[in-house]
């Protein structure tokens, strides 16, 4: 009898413990190769404990699954992203939003360094870093050397709003498309912008005009 | 200017494949109006004057053209081009061509673009079909900056019935910029009516922009020495010649001032299928976080999207117009990874978005929603 009671308690305990051993997100168990679920779940839990956004990690695992990647490749991709998210959050500050951290991780992968993200946060204060960081990554992607792009985006951080950042990026890309080298394109646009800074307290966005 | 280069290729082919044709001189003057929408500018009406002069002989050709474009604002674009080509049969069935071109392009007070280019091409084939391989190198400048553009091209032409066509792939390098243009051309000739069209895409681009483009031009003869020319479409940025991408429509009256002894021989080729895989993507706000994703593609009958926004489950878009596909989704500000698929083909990166290598050996687009 006593043995039966002990067995009953053990089974009950197992039943209570079992859900915690399952994937935290049902999408993982349903879509990701079985052998990848536990390692990914551990990464997700660790990120959650650290206050990092977890949805990008789930997304990365689902992306790998949809592309029929191997379990090992998916786990490594999620692990890498978790590291980038952590580095971005550490660089931009604990109060950064999930969107900012995700954009920061993307910029780090594009070639920006964590110090650039920290400098951007200092210059932007409480304004969102989402667009400046995305523009930074875009500039690096079109061939602007990372240090040049970082310098430009940081210089503009204090006076530009999101729309102005987007217009700045578009102008640089257009100049490059017209044959300017990435370095000279960003130099010319930056010079024009800083001239505007010195002549007017609040620079206006470059508005389209008729040719 | 791209069209001028094409004209010389056509002239070279015509002369090289018909050595008994006599020389001819042709001069035209186009006067007209257009609506031009350059990238980064507001659309504007403009008037233009465009003289063209060309002399063709069996083994060489020379030509020159100019354009004066006056916008609503009073600003002007002045373009000038001079070019020449010499060709000879190297071995039976293979012809060589050397050509040179120099041009300027000046917009208002901005520094003018200038270029000088030399090209060499080898043609193999006959009047009904063939292929060529060519290379171009030279120097381009704007203001105090100079560059050394280079290009490699491979193309083919064919002719069936009253239609002629050619397809060409050109890889261009200009300083830190490089891109690949894949373009198909078709022309249909009839006494009194000529229809020319092109459709292309710029891809494998680092700093040269990317996307689909195409133009259509219809020329209707009015008597022996006049014609009406209607054209429209989109052309891509040409960093070598300082031409900015634009959408345009134009109408002009063409006066034939000089005409040689023979008309231009019609080229003949089958219609060219549009390039596949060209699609652009835009996001438009609706209300709150609800946003409309619009994919524009002229070539698909089914469009799907997958990515962070859909938990990486393919989501079919709804066709809402000619070449236009949409879906409305709640999307919070952020950076999202997406791919699109046309007609069940491979997952691709839509034009207009930054692309990067993903962790799984493919390419992914990054959609930034501010």
Image (cartoon, coloured by chain):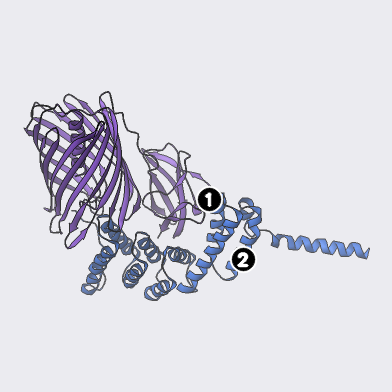
Chain colours: A blue, B purple
Local packing at callout 2 (Cα closer than 10 Å; few below 14, some 14-19, many 20+) is some
Quick one: quadrant of the N terminus of chain A? bottom right
* Farthest bottom residue in view: A122
Q: Which residue is mark 1?
A: B312
Is residue B257 shown left or right of residue B351? left
Establish if A196 lies above or below B221: below
Q: Which residue is mark 2?
A: A45
- The image quarter containing residue B89 is top left
x then y, percent, for residue A209: 21, 56
Residue at 63% in and 64% down: A42
- Tag count in the figure? 2
Is residue B8 shown left or right of residue B205? left
- Chain on which label 1 sits: B
- The image quarter containing residue A135 is bottom left
- The image quarter containing residue B333 is bottom left
x then y, percent, for residue B72: 14, 50
Residue at 46% in and 49% down: B339
- Name the secondary structure under disc 2: helix
Is residue A78 shown left or right of residue B138? right
x then y, percent, for residue A122: 39, 76
Q: Is residue A69 visible?
A: yes
* Farthest front residue in view: B91
Local packing at callout 1 (Cα closer than 10 Å; few below 14, some 14-19, many 20+) is many
x then y, percent, for residue A64: 55, 53
Establish if B254 lies above or below A61: above
Residue B287: mark: none
Q: Compute the Cα span from label 1 to label 2.
A: 21 Å
- Chain on which label 2 sits: A
Nearest to the observer: residue B46 or residue A185: A185
Label 2 near label 1: C-beta < 8 Å? no
């Amino acid at each position: 009898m006593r043995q039966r009671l002990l067995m009953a308690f053990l089974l009950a305990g197992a039943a209570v413990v079992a859900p915690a051993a399952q994937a935290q997100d049902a999408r993982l168990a349903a879509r990701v190769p079985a052998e990848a679920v536990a390692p990914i779940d551990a990464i997700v839990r660790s990120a959650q404990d650290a206050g990092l956004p977890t949805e990008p990690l789930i997304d990365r695992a689902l992306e790998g699954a949809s592309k029929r990647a191997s379990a090992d490749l998916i786990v490594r991709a999620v692990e890498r992203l978790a590291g980038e998210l952590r580095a971005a959050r550490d660089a931009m500050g604990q109060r950064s939003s999930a969107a900012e951290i995700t954009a920061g991780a993307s910029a780090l992968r594009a070639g920006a360094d964590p110090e650039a993200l920290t400098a951007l946060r200092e210059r932007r204060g409480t304004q969102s870093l989402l667009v400046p960081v995305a523009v930074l990554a875009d500039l690096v992607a079109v061939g602007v050397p990372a240090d040049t792009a970082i310098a430009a985006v940081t210089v503009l951080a204090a006076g530009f709003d999101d729309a102005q950042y987007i217009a700045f990026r578009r102008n640089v890309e257009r100049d490059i498309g017209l044959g300017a080298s990435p370095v000279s394109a960003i130099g010319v646009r930056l010079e024009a912008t800083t001239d505007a800074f010195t002549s007017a307290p609040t620079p206006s966005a470059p508005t389209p005009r008729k040719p | 200017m791209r069209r001028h280069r094409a004209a010389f290729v056509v002239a070279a082919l015509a002369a090289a494949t018909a050595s008994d044709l006599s020389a001819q001189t042709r001069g035209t003057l186009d006067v007209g109006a257009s609506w031009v929408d350059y990238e980064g500018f507001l659309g504007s009406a403009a008037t233009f004057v465009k003289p063209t002069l060309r002399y063709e002989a069996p083994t060489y050709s020379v030509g020159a053209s100019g354009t004066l474009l006056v916008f609503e604002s009073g600003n002007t674009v002045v373009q000038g081009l001079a070019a020449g080509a010499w060709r000879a049969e190297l071995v039976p069935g293979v012809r060589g061509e050397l050509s040179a071109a120099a041009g300027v392009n000046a917009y208002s007070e901005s520094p003018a673009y200038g270029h000088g280019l030399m090209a060499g091409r080898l043609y193999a084939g006959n009047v009904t079909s063939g292929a060529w391989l060519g290379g171009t190198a030279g120097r381009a400048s704007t203001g105090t900056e100079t560059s050394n553009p280079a290009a490699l091209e491979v193309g083919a032409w064919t002719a069936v019935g009253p239609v002629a066509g050619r397809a060409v792939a050109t890889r261009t390098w200009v300083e830190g910029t490089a891109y690949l243009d894949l373009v198909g051309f078709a022309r249909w000739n009839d006494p009194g009516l000529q229809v020319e069209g092109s459709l292309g895409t710029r891809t494998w681009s680092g700093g040269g922009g990317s996307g689909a483009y195409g133009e259509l031009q219809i020329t209707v003869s009015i008597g022996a020495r006049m014609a009406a020319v209607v054209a429209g479409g989109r052309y891509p940025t040409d960093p070598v010649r300082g031409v900015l991408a634009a959408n345009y429509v134009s109408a002009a009256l063409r006066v034939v001032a000089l005409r040689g002894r023979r008309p231009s021989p019609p080229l003949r080729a089958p219609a060219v299928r549009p390039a596949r895989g060209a699609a652009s993507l835009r996001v438009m706000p609706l209300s709150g976080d609800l946003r409309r994703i619009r994919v524009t593609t002229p070539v698909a009958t089914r469009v799907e999207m997958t990515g962070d926004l859909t938990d990486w489950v393919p989501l079919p878009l709804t066709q809402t117009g000619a070449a236009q596909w949409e879906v409305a989704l709640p999307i919070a500000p952020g950076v999202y990874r997406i791919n699109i698929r046309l007609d069940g083909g491979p997952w691709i990166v839509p034009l207009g978005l930054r692309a990067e290598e993903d962790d799984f050996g493919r390419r992914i687009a990054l959609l930034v929603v501010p």
